Image (spheres, rainbow, N blue to C red):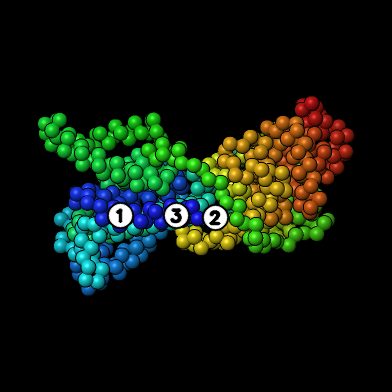
Amino acid sequence: MKTSLKWLFLFACVPLVAALPLPDFWIFQLNYIGLYALTCLGLVLLTGVAGLTSFGQAAFVGMGAYTTAWLTLNTDLSPWLTLWVGLGLTGVSALAVGLMTLRMSGHYLPLATIAWGLSLYYLMGNLDALGKYDGLLGLKSLTLGDFNIGQGRAFFALTWVIVLSAAWGMLNLLDSRAGRVIRSLKNGTQMAEAMGINTFRYKVIAFVLAAMLASVSGWLMAHFQRTVNPSAFGLKMGIEYLFMTVVGGVGYVWGAVVGSGLVKLLDDYLQVLLPRLIGTSGSYEVIVFGIVLVLVLKYMPEGLWSLVARFLPRSDRAENWHNAAALSERNKPAAGEWVLDVQGIRKQFGGLVAVNDISFQIKAQQIVGLIGPNGAGKSTTFNLITGVLGLTSGAVRYRGETISGLASRDIARRGMARTFQHVKMIPDMTVLENVAMGAYSRSQRGVVSAMLRTNQAEEQALFKEAQKQLQRIGMAEHMHELAGNLAMGQQRLMEIARALCADPALLLLDEPAAGLRHKEKQNLAQVLRQLRDQGMSILLVEHDMDLVMQVCDHLVVMEFGTLLTQGTPQDIQQSPAVRAAYLGTEH
Ligand code: ADP
Ligand code: MG
């Protein structure tokens, strides 16, 4: 209720500001700020949240602008229709560009967006139909029936209602199943893929959404300026949009608004002031912008809004999910049934045989420990089973199906859930939200339903499940804390809860006891035994012999990539070969 009141107030501010006796020039400035803010909102999603840098947003603004300009000048189409044509064209182009470039890593993506921005700029500047570098002139203002929206207060109202709606949709998105995935992209994709998520798909979605926001801005801009020409959509503007977003706060939705406001006002001010100071005219403001950017990046890397955000109260998520429906559960193997059958798997890294024809099985409701000295090949085996690495030879069968060769997300969807040797989580999300990501493949609501907030029943079901799994491992009292603030042991337990959210038939844990204190280890052993008693099968890769001996039903011992021996903990403890290879060096 409180948030809907806040939004009501924000939307009510639009007609209020329009009715204030402000000078026309101010309204004019606010209109530009709104137009820029729309594009910057897309950059917040793309660059700030998903970690994908784009210098090419101005080109998408240009697509929206040129589409409506050409169509309204050459056809009878209403601008309200050309908006959708522009959105369609932009969407399709962004999809094509995204599919081609988003698999690139590191600096290749920003470079590709520069190339894209430049090529569209030259295309706009060289097509006769688009008026070459002079552009298209004589566009009409937007009208609503007989009412002329013009360039003043009515345009202000239209633009800012769109900006606020976009901000609302964006904040809704970020607080949803799909949004949590987009928020996870910045820290690498391995974790999300292990939750059964196709992360590439979400990169493309973020890219297309950002482009479409830019396109709406272009549509508005064309009818605001009543002329379009390439200079407003070139690389310089692309860089400027990114600059605005970074200065405002690239990780915050409201940073887009603050940044566009600040840069627009600073720009105008400097264009008057600098020539007077220096004595000649020229684009000196670019130099000041450069200096400001360096200072912001050095002293306030999260942008201006981070200063404000620090003072905003962080409200706990209302626990409104107690009546939510339970998520569907998969059928589980009966006790004693084979769950995992590893058949002679092998992994070579060049000349090194890291895993040398290893075979073992796991039955339902069994905890199997995979042990061996450092470098024995445990993690590699783990990654071969979960599909993170490809097999050199051999096969892995899971519940009667050959899964070797499948992507890790497809293996995860079949009910194999894992944790990581080095905890992978989203530190600035709450424990509850992190854990809810584990249930991704048991839910389906997408981006549109998230933005319109029609996903709430499913969201509640997800949080109910997350809370249930946190309770199961004794972490419920931490659910509203930020994951990054937890102690190491708690983070590891959180990962187990997240894996359990997937309703797995097989749980794979990579060194869950690493970095835990004695009492935390005892607690972990307790949790693992309890999970087994509730029907879970577990593969435990572990260094800690005490823990392994306490909880495992069966042990597989590796050394230098090969299988040394396997058997019950008692057998293993008495095996002279194991003592020599492992216990001897460890104890
Ligand atoms: P463990 O988890 O038992 O400590 P690992 O499976 O991590 O052992 O490593 C087994 C061997 O394979 C080590 O010698 C390691 O250096 C090597 N290795 C692991 N990953 C790679 C890789 N990606 N490229 C080359 N060698 C690797
Ligand atoms: Mg390891």
Q: Amino acid at mark 2?
A: Arg
Residue 140: % across, % down: 19, 64
Q: Which residue is mark 3?
A: 5
**Mark 1 = which residue?**
16
- Foreground mark, 1 or 2? 1
In the displayed structure, 585 sits above or below 158; it is above
Residue 73 left/right relative to 9: left
**Label 2: element kind:** helix
- Going from the N terminus, do you reach mark 2 or mark 3 first? 3
Work out whether residue 550 can be spotted.
yes
Query: Observer-nearest residue: 24 or 460?
Result: 24
Residue 234, horizontal then vertical, whole percent: 26, 49
Identify the image quadrant of residue 279. top left
Q: Judge depth for marks 2 and 3 and give the one in front.
A: 3
> In percent of the image, x 33 and y 43: which residue is there?
259
Circles 1 and 3: CB distance less than 8 Å?
no
Q: CA distance from mark 1 to mark 2?
A: 35 Å
Near-viewer residue (508 or 248) = 248
The amino acid type, in three-letter code, at marker 3 is Leu
Q: Does dot 3 land on a helix, a strand or a loop?
A: helix
Q: Residue at x 60, y 52 (%)?
A: 319
Q: Quadrant of the C terminus?
A: top right
Q: Is residue 249 left or right of residue 263?
A: right
Instruction: Please tell me how crowded label 3 is: few (under 14), some (14-19), or many (20+) other residues with Cα within 10 Å.
Output: few
In the picture of the structure, the residue carrying the numbered disc 2 is: 177
Near mark 1 (Cα within 10 A), the count class, few <14, some 14-19 or many ≥20, is few
